[in-house]
Amino acid sequence: MLVPMKRLTLIALRADKDNIMSALQEIAAVHVISSDSATGDHSSFDDIFASFEEGIRRFREAHRQIANYAEKPGLLTPQKQVEKDALTSQRTIDKAMDAVMKIESQAALLGELKAKHTQVLNFANTLKPWIKLKHNIEDVRSTKHTKVFCAYIPKHNISKLEGVPVSIEVVDDSASLAPCVLACHASDYDEVMLRLHDAGGTEFSFQSDLRGQVVHIYDALMSKANEIAEETEKEQKEFERLGNESDKLLLAIDALNVEYERQRAKAELLVSNSAFILEGWVRSDQLDLVEQAIKGVTDAYYIEFTDPKEDETPPTVVKNNKFNSQFEAITNMFSLPNYRGIDATPLMAPFYLLFFGLMLSDSGYGLVLYILCKLYLWLKKPKGTFGQIVRVIAWGGLSTVVCGFFVGTFFGLSWNKVFFGTAEGPFPLLFDPLKNTISMLLFCCGLGLLQMMFALGVDAYMKVKSGDAQAAIFDSVSWIFLVVGLVGILAVPKYSAPFLVLALIGGLLILLFAGREKKNIFGRLGKGAGALYGVSGYIGDTVSYSRIFAMGLVTGAMGEVFNLLGGMLAGAGSGVVGVLTTILAGVVLVVLHGFSLFINTLGTFAHTARLQFVEFFGKFYQTGGIGFKPLGYHLKHFDIKSFTNAEKR
C-alpha cells in the first residue's frame, strides 16, 4: 500500500538549527524540500561542500592505493558493523587523516624510488652498447688538429665509409647498429660527418663528467639500480602493511558522507538572523516520531503537518507485509508508483511466484536454489534492494519445488522414476510439457489472459475510486467483456451464445464510447473503430505468455540431456576404470546441472519480470513516483550496530 504523506513546516530558533538537524538525521524520517527562497548563509555552504568533497576524494584515493593489500571480505562475510557514535566523532576523521598522511608519504617515497630506478636503468642502457670500449672515456677526446668522436653506424653500411679520410674502431661488431670510435683530421671533419649521415650513422656523446672505462661505470650503475630495487621492495612491503588502514578510511568516508548530507539539508533551509524554516515531507505514520525528536532538542518551535496540495507531488513510500515487501525490488526495477496511483507489489507478487515456478519447473533446481539463497541470507545478511532480490529468488525456489510436481521434473528425472522407479505413473499432476505441448501452451496463455483481465479490473477500480465511473466502464470493463467473450467463443464453441453476447456488449461499448469526447457522431464511431483494432494487441500480449512454456521446456530438456550424458559415462569400462568413470560422471552431472540452474534461473528472473512490466503493469500501473529520501545515515561500507530510533535506510 502507498503511505499517505504530510507536508512538514517547522519554524525554530537559529541557535537550535544544528541540534535539530542532527536529531532529524538520527530518526531518518524527514525528506527535506529544497527551498527556492533559501537565504541567509546559503552561499557560505559552497566552501563547506568543497571541503567535504575534497576530504572524501582524498580518503577514496588513499583507499584505492591500498585496496589490493587490504583484507578481502569473503563472499559470505556480512558487512562490518560500527557504533553510530563513531560516525559523528572527530576522532574517526583524525585517525583516517593520519592514515592518509602515511599512505600519501609512502606512495610519494615509492614513486621517487621507482622514478630513480628507471632513471638509473635508462642511463645504464645508454652505456651498455659501449661496455667493450677499451679506452677510458676521458681519452676519447679531440685535439687541435684531430677530431675524435663516437657514433652508431649500421653494421652493413660501415663499408660505405671506405675511402673516406677517417679511422674507424668498431667497439662491438656483434651489434646491428655498431658502436664505433672515429678519428679524422680536423680539416676533414665536415666531409666525414656528411658521409657518416649518408651511411645512416648518428653521433653519440658521453656525459662530460664521466671518467674511466664504460664497463666499470655500467657495473656501478647496475649495482646502484639493484640497491634502489631492494630499497623499493622494502618500502613496498611497508606500503602493503598500510592495507590494515582500510577500515579507518572507509569509516571516515561514511562519516563524511553523513555530515555532508546534513550540511546539504541545512543549505536548503530558509534562515534569518534569529530563526529558520524547514519544509519537508513526512510519512503520516511517523508524525509523532518527528515531533518527539524536535521536542528532545527544544520547546521553542512551531510545527505544522498539512495534506499535499493538488499541484504538489509528494515522494512515494510503500508499506507492505513481510512477504510482499520483498517484491518491492521487482516493482522498483520498473518504476516507483505514482503517489496518487496504486502500489502494484501485492498484486504482482503471486503472479510472479507462479510464473517463476512454472518457468524453472524443476523441483530439484528449486530446492537447491532455495537452500543456496537461505544460506547466503543467513551468512551475508544482505540489505536493501539486493537483499530483497535474493529473498524473491528464494521464494521462487519454493514455488519451483511445488510447480515441479505439476509440470516439471527433479534434476531432469521424471517424478515417476524418482518415486516409483518406472516411467509410468501419476506425475506430472498437470501436464508434461514434452508430451502435452499444446495443452501446456494453452494453459500458459490462459494464465496470461487471467492476469491481463485482472489488471483491467484493477484499472477499473482505480478509475471508480478517482470518481470516473464512465472511464471504468467504457475503457476497462468493456475490454474485459470483449476479450473474455472472444476467448469463450473459441474455447467452448458448444456454449458460445453467452460469450457471444458478452463480446458484442464489450465491442459496442468500445465502438460507441471510446471516442466519447468527440462531438460528431462519425468522429466518435471512427475513433471507436480504431480502438477496436486494439484487440490485436491483446492477442500479441497473450502470445507473450508462451515464454512460460518455452522456459519450462528448455529447463526440462537440458536436464534430460545432461542425465543422458552422465548415464552414458557412468560405469563405462570395467573394474577400476568403471569406478573412475562413475566418479567422473558424478562430477560432470554436478557441473552441468549447476550451469543449467544458473542460466535458467537468470532467464527465469528476467522473463518473469518482463511479463509483469509489459503485459501486467502496462494495463493499469501509474509510474513516475519520486523516491522518499529522508535525511539520515546512508552508509555504503558499514552497517550501524545499534540504530534503534528508526529503521536504517
Image: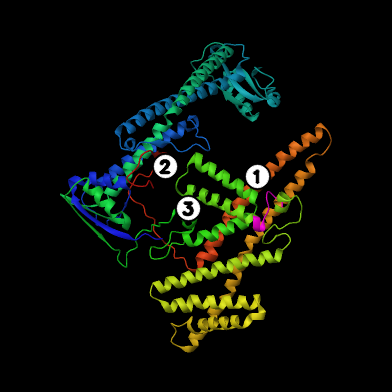
Which element carries disc 1, helix, strand or loop? helix
Residue marked by disc 1: 594
The answer to which of marks 3 and 1 sits earlier in the sequence is: 3
Q: In this view, does 316 lie to the left or right of 579?
A: left
- Residue kind at label 1, given as amino acid type: Gly
Q: Position of residue 273 (x, y in %)?
A: 16, 49
Q: Could you tell me how far apart the alpha carbons at marks 3 and 2 are, in whole angstroms? A: 21 Å
Is 409 magenta? The answer is yes
Q: Which amino acid lies under the numbered mark 3 shown in the image of this protein?
A: Gln
Where is residue 616 shown, x and y percent of the image?
Answer: 52, 65
Q: Is mark 3 on a helix, strand or loop?
A: loop
**Looking at the rendered structure, which numbered label has been put on residue 326?**
3
Mark closer to the observer (1, 2): 1
Residues at badges 1 and 2 in contact (C-beta under 8 Å)? no
Where is residue 106? Give x, y as percent. Answer: 42, 25
Residue density around tag 1, few if under 14, some if 14–19, many if 20 or more, within 10 Å: some
Task: State which quadrant residue 173 falls in.
Answer: top right
226 and 52: which one is in front?
A: 52
Along the horizontal axis of the image, is 182 left or right of 4?
right
Which x, y percent locates residue 574?
84, 35
Is the stretch drawn in magenta largely helix, strand or loop?
loop
Q: Give the range drawn in magenta.
A: 405-414
Local crowd at mark 3 within 10 Å, few (<14), some, or many (≥20)?
many
Evaluate whether residue 362 shows in this view: yes
Residue at (36% x, 31% y) in the render: 96
Q: Is mark 2 on a helix, strand or loop?
A: loop
Residue 142 appears in view: no
Identity of the residue drawn at 25% across and 48% down: 293
Task: Name the outermost residue toward the bottom.
Answer: 521
Depicted 138 relative to depicted 377: above or below? above
The residue that disc 2 covers is 636
